[in-house]
Image (spheres, grey):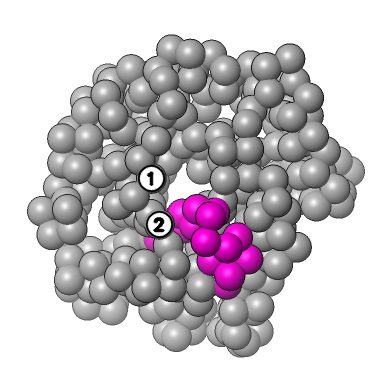
Amino acid sequence: MDLSGVGVWSAGLGYGDAAEAVDAVAELEELGFSAVWVPDPGGPEVFHAADRLLAASRRMVVATGVLNLWAHTPAAAAAAYTSLSAAHGDRFLLGVGVSHAHRVDSGRYRGPLAAMTAFLDGLDTADEPVPSEGRVLAALGPKMLEVAAKRARGVHPYLVTPEHTRRAREAVGGGGLVLPEQTVVLAADADDARAIAGDWLRSYLAQPNYANSLLRLGFTEEDVSTMSDRLFDAVIAWGDEAAVKRRIDEHRAAGADHVALQVLTAESAASPTALSRTQWRRLATALI
């Protein structure tokens, strides 16, 4: 399983037009991207999507970015992992996360660390277990990073900065994988970038898990509440291809093995299932 280089994070590849997604993932492989990451809508669709994308590619890793553990039993996740691995070889990576309280049925979201530990226990004791090297965790805070270091192949954090990558590398050590998501906007200037990604980012800043993560990274309450320029510029890699490359290089210098690019356009920010194929081609030419 090659998790070097650069990947693409895209809801559209999983849940947009299936025929176009199949065509797009084959093109992404030819362009040189090493992995695609799809989020979990909260049901078996995520595994059906992974199966389609694996079948449409030959070498590329397909990963969940990430599986919402509240929406799946460990037994079902392990069975899906085993089936996909049997059909497609060592190319499916199970990313697992604890999601957010407001996205989980009322009263169920308690003790995310305990919930993750219990879910991993279930993966370990399933009829056909998911090996630790077959899973990564969406770890943001130090305690979840510690769990990942002990019980997973590494981490796939979302909405982070190179400083988080540095901390994640320290937490998982030299043997773990650090695979951050990085949001990208190809825009001519700051106003254009904010017009595309401003509302999108505000929706995440309103979620406590992400707000607290950014506070731990040194941003202030005011940065978060106002979506300051400082915060926007640190979280969103915007500008031309050279600006995106600089951000990827910063993650790599901080210890990243692989960076998953989520490319926002005006269309994809409004409709998550839209595919950013023109932008992926531009980035491949510059980065790969």
Task: Tell me the quarter of the picture where residue 190 sits.
Answer: bottom left
Asked if the residue at tag 2 contacts the one at tag 1, i.e. Cβ–Cβ closer than 8 Å, the answer is: yes
Determine crowd level at label 2: few under 14, some 14-19, many 20+ residues with C-alpha closer than 10 A: some
Please name the residue that numbered disc 1 is placed on: 3
**Above or below 151: residue 222:** below
Query: In x, y percent, where is residue 61?
Result: 38, 34
Residue 140: mark in rendering: none
Task: Tell me the quarter of the picture where residue 186 sits.
Answer: bottom left
Q: Which residues are magenta?
A: 167-182
Please name the residue that numbered disc 2 is placed on: 257
Q: Amino acid at mark 2?
A: Asp
Pick out the residue farthest to the left. Answer: 285
**Above or below 219: residue 138:** above
Label 1 and label 2: CA atoms lie apart by 7 Å
Number of numbered discs overlaid on the protein picture = 2
Q: Residue at x 15, y 35 (%)?
A: 30
